[in-house]
Each structure stands twice: as C-alpha cells, then as structure tokens.
C-alpha cells in the first residue's frame, strides 16, 4: 500500500464541525470499500465497478476529497469507453481502467487521528 | 398529515424532504449538511422505495439522483408527474457536472431545479429553501380552493374527497366511523327578519362553534346553504352523538348581537358504525340525511342517530 504522507489525499472538510465525524467515517470505511471494488474486479462485475466509480464521483467532492472525485469521474468515462459488452472486455483492460481510482482510494487519509476513530 | 384536519391552513410540523440516491455516502453527507435546517429529512435508496414513500407520506420536496440502478430518477419523475396527488411536489435533481443533457430531460419531465454534485453547501440550502417555499404556496392555493369563503370551513369538494378516503380507510381496517349533517332551524326567517348580514353572522357563528368542538382528525365543512357536515374517523355512533349534542347545545345557547331575543337552533342527523359496513360513501350521507329529516320532523333542535353495520341501518336514540 502506498502510504507516504506527501501522496496522501486529505479532506478540506476534516475540520468543519458539521463534517468532521462523517469525513472520519468515510476514511475508516475506505478499506471495506476497496475490498468491494476488488471483488467486483475479480468477478468481472462491470456494473458494480461502474456504480462504484459513479457513486464516488458524486460523493467524494462533498466529503472534501475533490481530487478523488475527479479521478472517479475520469474512471467512469474510461469505463464507459470500454463499452458494455462484457464478452469483449478483458480483465487486464478493466483493471487498468480502475487502477488510478484504486490507488487514489488507498491514499485517502485523515491529517490527524480522529477522536472517535 | 397537516392538510387534512378540521382546521384548514394549520402550520405543518417540519416539512418532509426526501433524499433519493443509491449511494449511502450521499445520504450521510446531506444529513450532516442539512442538520440545522428545519426539515424532516428522509432517505430512499432506490426509485421504487422513493415512490412507495411519497405515495404514503406528505412529502414537501424531493432531492432526486438521476443515475440509479433499477428504476432511475427519470422514471421517478415520470411517475410523480403523471399523478394528480404528486405532480406539484417540487423536485430538485442531483446531477453530475457533465450531465447537462440529463438536466434538460429532467426539466422536461417536471423537475423544478437541479443541484450539481459535488454540492455547494450554501447553494444546496438556498435551493432547498426555495423549493419548500414553492411547496408552501402550492399547498396554500390548494387549500384556498377547498375552503368556504364565508365560514372558513372546508367546502363541499374537500368533503367529498376526504369522505372517500376516510370511509375506505375505516372499511379496510374495520374501525368506527361517523358522519353528521347539521341544518340550522328556520334559517330563512333569520335572513327575512334581520337581513342577510344577520344570516351570514349566524352561519359564521355556527361554523365557529362546530370547528371549535371537533377534534383534529375530524373534517368540518360547509355542506351548502345553511348545512354543515362533519366527518369523524375513529368515532362510534355513541361518541358522535355526544359530540353533536354538545355542539347543538352550544349553538342553542349562543347570544346573537343582531337579534338578542332570537335564539338559533340546529337539527343534526348522524350516521355511524362501530366497524366495517360495506356501504358506499353516498349511502352514509343518505343515511345521515334521513336521520336529519327525522330530527326536523321530531321537532328540531335535536340529534338523531342511525347506526349502520353489516346488517344494514338501525335507528338509534334521539337526543
């Protein structure tokens, strides 16, 4: 896993009193989310992969992870360009399309450990 | 629901705002971002769940995601737009930045506004407030159209609508239900002897006593001329009789400034049941009308009750 601090992605809302708690939750749940994406990739479940990218595109910015949202949007576009014919998409192409998003997900961090964590 | 009580134009409790999005992340985000808004925020994670909720609740505004698996936002818009009861609910579409074609289509299907993800916080709040304002105005217009101008009670068309709802609900759940028809005695002579302003004052005074006596769940309306009707859900014929008798007495005792020496009385016919009857709404009114006729025949200023049940109508005691 890629954990160095200079490459970490932080939320601009981490210290917003309305948001601190759910930003922390967003980060804490990330390993589970990555696990879901990984298993969707393993089973070549294109729809689940697309939904994953689509939902992160819509939500990440709202949690203050703007860059993550942008990467998710780009991933969604790439996935769409792969087409919807599962038979013609190979596993390597799917993994390649999702790699930037997966890497970004791994880099999501809190700048300070959250009290409730 | 706030628009169904005896007193029109009540202030609703917090308006319900429904968020429809397949992503739990969005629900959590909006819940945090809107926590200080005076709204009752609810959540649906699919189009079908949203429709089910909206048809069962008084929803003031919908925040709707377009891209959902299964039934998507467009289908939700289409469904809500086609139905009279839901076509005026303001819908704010939650859309992605690159989806302008989607926005155009959503507006075509009746969406009122859109918010682009990721949400700009102040914009989100401002747009939601504006949607709630529109909802309040539409509700007010609807209520005005269902109010009687002279007395402020509901009018006949509202009564017909509520009557169907309340009776079918009572029948379904095998619960008590009663309806009462009121007719002011010798009303014409008030108009003839003291003038029409005195007649209007009599109608207003009676309406005030009726609406002051009924409970929140009851529906009081001006049925026409000098006739009033009250729908009483969850009310047995005996309880309805007691309530109507109190109203009868309060009208008979009222002092009328334009004719201090002339009292006004009312005759009341009640049709009520302890549970399911299988009767159609028009039969309930016909039975109440027949009871009212007997109250008049019996000397006026009285309540006559007909109890109905599975085995047909039975005349109960008069008071």
Image (cartoon, coloured by chain):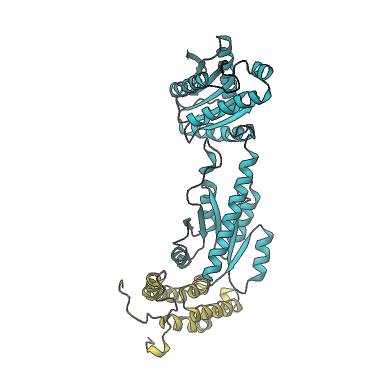
Chain colours: A yellow, B cyan
Q: Position of residue A23 (x, y in %)?
A: 40, 73
Q: Position of residue B270 (x, y in %)?
A: 52, 21
Q: In the figure, residue B111 lies in which quadrant? A: bottom right
Q: Residue at x 43, y 83 (%)?
A: A9
Q: Work out whether residue B94 or residue A71 is closer to the camera in this orientation and state it.
A: B94
Above or below, comparing residue B9 to residue B226 in the picture: below
Is A96 on the left-hand or right-hand side of B199? Answer: left
Q: Residue at x 52, y 81 (%)?
A: A71
Q: Position of residue B164 (x, y in %)?
A: 58, 33
Count the numbered circles shown: 0
Q: Work out whether residue B225 or residue A112 is closer to the camera in this orientation and state it.
A: B225
Is A30 on the left-hand or right-hand side of B213? Answer: left
Q: Residue at x 45, y 79 (%)?
A: A12
Q: In the figure, residue B99 lies in which quadrant? A: bottom right
Q: Position of residue B162 (x, y in %)?
A: 57, 35
Q: Is residue B71 something one can see in this rendering?
A: no
Is B65 on the left-hand or right-hand side of A40? Answer: right
Above or below, comparing residue A88 to residue B157 in the picture: below
Q: In the figure, residue B182 lies in which quadrant? A: top right
Q: Residue at x 65, y 40 (%)?
A: B145
Of all residues, the one furthest to the top in this rendering is: B298
Above or below, comparing residue A80 to residue B50 in the picture: below
Q: Is residue B118 something one can see in this rendering?
A: yes
């Amino acid at each position: 896993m890629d954990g160095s601090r200079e490459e970490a992605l932080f939320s601009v809302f981490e210290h917003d009193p309305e948001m601190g708690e759910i930003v922390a939750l967003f980060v804490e749940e990330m390993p589970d989310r990555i696990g879901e994406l990984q298993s969707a990739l393993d089973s070549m479940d294109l729809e689940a992969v697309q939904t994953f990218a689509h939902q992160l595109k819509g939500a990440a910015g709202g949690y203050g992870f703007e860059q993550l949202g942008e990467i998710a949007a780009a991933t969604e576009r790439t996935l769409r360009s792969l087409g919807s014919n599962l038979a013609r998409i190979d596993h390597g192409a799917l993994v390649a399309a999702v790699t930037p998003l997966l890497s970004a997900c791994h880099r999501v961090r809190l700048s300070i450990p959250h009290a409730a964590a | 629901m706030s628009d169904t009580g005896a007193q029109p134009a009540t202030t609703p409790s917090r308006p319900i705002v429904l968020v429809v999005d397949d992503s739990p992340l969005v629900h959590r985000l909006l819940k945090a971002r809107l926590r200080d808004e005076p709204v009752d925020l609810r959540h649906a994670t699919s189009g079908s769940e949203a429709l089910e909720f909206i048809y069962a609740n008084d929803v003031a505004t919908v925040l709707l995601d377009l891209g959902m698996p299964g039934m998507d936002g467009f289908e939700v818009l289409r469904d809500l737009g086609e139905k009279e009861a839901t076509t005026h609910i303001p819908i704010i579409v939650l859309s992605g930045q690159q989806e302008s074609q989607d926005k155009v289509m959503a507006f075509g299907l009746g969406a009122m506004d859109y918010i682009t993800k990721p949400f700009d916080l102040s914009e989100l709040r401002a747009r939601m407030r504006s949607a709630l304002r529109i909802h309040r105005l539409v509700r007010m217009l609807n209520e005005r159209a269902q109010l009687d101008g002279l007395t402020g009670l509901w009018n006949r068309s509202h009564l017909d609508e509520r009557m169907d709802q309340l009776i079918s609900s009572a029948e379904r759940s095998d619960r008590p239900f009663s309806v009462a028809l009121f007719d002011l005695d010798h009303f014409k002579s008030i108009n003839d002897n003291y003038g029409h302003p005195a007649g209007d004052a009599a109608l207003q005074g009676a309406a005030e006593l009726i609406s002051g006596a009924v409970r929140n769940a009851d529906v009081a309306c001006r049925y026409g001329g000098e006739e009033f009707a009250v729908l009483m859900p969850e009310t047995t014929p005996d309880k309805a009789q007691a309530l109507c008798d109190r109203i009868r007495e309060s009208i008979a005792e009222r002092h009328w400034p334009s004719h201090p020496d002339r009292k006004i009385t009312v005759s009341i016919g009640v049709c009520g049941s302890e549970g399911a009857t299988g009767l159609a709404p028009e039969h309930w009114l016909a039975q109440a009308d027949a009871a009212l006729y007997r109250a008049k025949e019996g000397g006026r200023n009285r309540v006559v009750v007909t109890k109905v049940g599975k085995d047909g109508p039975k005349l109960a005691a008069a008071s």
